[in-house]
Amino acid sequence: MLLKTFGWSFAITAIGLALAVLYDGWTAFGVVAILAVLEISLSFDNAVINAGILKKMNAFWQKIFLTVGVLIAVFGMRLVFPVVIVSISAKIGPFDAVDLALNDADRYQQLVTDAHPSIAAFGGMFLLMIFLDFIFEDRDIKWLAWLERPLAKLGKIDMLSVCIAMIALLIASMTVATHAHQHGGAHVDKAQTVLIAGIAGLITYLVVGGLSGYFENRLEEDEEREHEAEEEAERTGSKVSAVVMAGKAAFFMFLYLEVLDASFSFDGVIGAFAITNDIVLMALGLGIGAMYVRSLTVYLVRQGTLDDYVYLEHGAHYAIGALAVILLVTIQYEIQEVITGSVGVLLIVWSFWSSVRRNRRLAADGGEDSSERAEVGSGV
């Protein structure tokens, strides 16, 4: 099971490290290995969140996630995305941006760094909305019940998450504007850029998340139609298109997953520049890491890990909230990548350990967790 799920990741790791050695010797080997570890540590919470969505999709779309999705994640976000950012920010063509990345790495890094505020605003708002919508929803199982109970009550207020996200964005943009004013108006249009990029992130979440939610609600209807189509195909001896069998619900959930992965990859791409500004090594290292994140997602789904360790999803969403705040803060202030990665990992480990303790209590009691019985009994 382990080899089947992680086989491609192991193969890509071997190929990637071999290419690194051929490209620039053993120093490149070490850089690519470090980048892969960085990507995995920064995106572990991404795997948990992805698994919560992917388990609702059929085997066909799970395969698409591991094939087409990997191409989008590795070549799109880890290779093409930085080039596009440089192309837009420097107002040069994509081929010129690639030439810049290969022949003037320092200038390329500077241009990507200059584009960080808009990247952080977009990704930060998208991830913040995911976190807010999670904590404001009333759930049967609560991890930090003392916090989640009152937040669930507040969540009954319409559009509260959008209002809080907009307030956070305004604070971030005003902080940038104030800093620019205090330093003689340097980068005075940076606040406007942050505001526009943040609003774009919010709109993207509302559109993609809304479509995903709409079609997810129709998932049962799609499954019934797919079952009927299968029976009809068996009777007539014809084949049913795999795309039709997957349903529109799965397609939009796949689209949502890709946008979510893109938002998670922002910190990895930016953080990679702290290690190297060589676009080839960056693509190899982050690509290897992205493969493991996807394999881990499928492993969590097939093992039923989220069902066995019920607080993992909570921990991942809290990690998302922390990452969102960190991204918004890094618009103006620098935060070390080790802090970004450590916060997410610690929250995941904490939620996992809480799940283990809960399972032990359940085994000892031989039934439902006493804290959950109290919540159900009180109608919380």
Image (tube, helix red, strand yellow):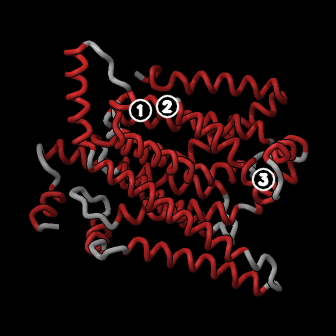
Judging by the rendered image, the residue that carries numbered circle 1 is 62
Residue 380 in the image: x percent, y percent?
A: 17, 67
Name the kind of residue labelled 1 in the image. Answer: Gln
Q: Quadrant of the N terminus?
A: top left
Furthest toward the right, the residue is 103
* Sequence-wise first label, 1 or 3: 1
Name the residue tied to disc 3: 87
Which kind of residue does numbered mark 3 sit on? Ser
Q: Which mark is residue 66?
A: 2
Q: Amino acid at mark 2?
A: Leu
Residue 368 in sight in this render: yes
* Residue depicted at 39% across the width and 36% down the height: 300
Asked which quadrant contains residue 117, the reply is bottom right
Task: Give the CA distance from mark 1 to mark 3.
Answer: 33 Å
Nearer the N terminus, badge 2 or badge 3? 2
Q: Marks 1 and 2, how far apart in space?
A: 6 Å
